[in-house]
Amino acid sequence: MSLSRIGKLPIMVPSGVTITVDSGDVTVVGPKGTLTQFITPAVDVKVEDGTLTVHPKDESKEARSQHGLMRALINNMVTGVTKGFEKKLEVNGVGFRVAVSNNELDMALGFSHPVKYKAPEGVMITNDKMVITVSGINKQQVGQVAAEIRALKKPEPYKGKGIKYVDEVILRKAGKTGK
């Protein structure tokens, strides 16, 4: 059986980052913080001379399927503690407004009440006019928070009002034509 294409790529450990592997956990410490990830028992993780490699323990289906996953998760941790991750959301709509104070979003989204969203620990929220930036060191957490904010007011297909990702394309529909 062939190895996972992603899984067999080694991860270069950048300077300023330390990776420790001990009894089922891998911990990555870098300039932006510390992340810990549980390692599935089906794979081996080794750190040698500034590179980290992931190997399946055997040729079982489980080991092969976890191989690329573990490598991707650890790679995301290394990127997170060095560069960090961010997602940008854009708010479109007349009368909509966004304000951030104390890592809490305060938005007027055309509902009868203001919408408040408190960011979890480890995630920063900032805004520049109508663009909200979600940033942090944990890729999964950043994506989750961005998705939750978008879900507060999904973009609609007629006028494109709502909260969308900056790189997202909203398919527009023609409205009905009255006679």
Image (tube, grey):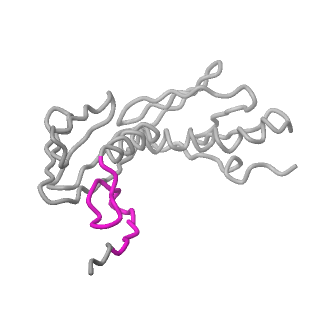
Q: Is residue 7 left or right of residue 58?
A: left
Q: Is 159 contained in the magenta span?
A: yes
Q: Residue furthest bottom?
A: 179
Report whether 55 appears left or right of 123. Answer: right
Q: In the shown orientation, is residue 102 left or right of residue 42?
A: left
Residue 43: x, y in percent? 73, 32
Give how far across and how far down residue 27 sits, in percent: 52, 27
Residue 159, quarter of the rendered image: bottom left
Q: Position of residue 130 (x, y in %)?
A: 18, 55
Predominant SS along the magenta part? loop
Residue at 71% over, 38% down = 66
Check the image and report above or below for 96 versus 65: below
Place residue 138 in its image quadrant. Answer: top left
29 lies left or right of 8: left
The magenta region covers: 153-174
Quadrant location of the C terminus?
bottom left
Residue at image x 55%, y 43%?
A: 75
Which image quadrant is residue 65 in? top right
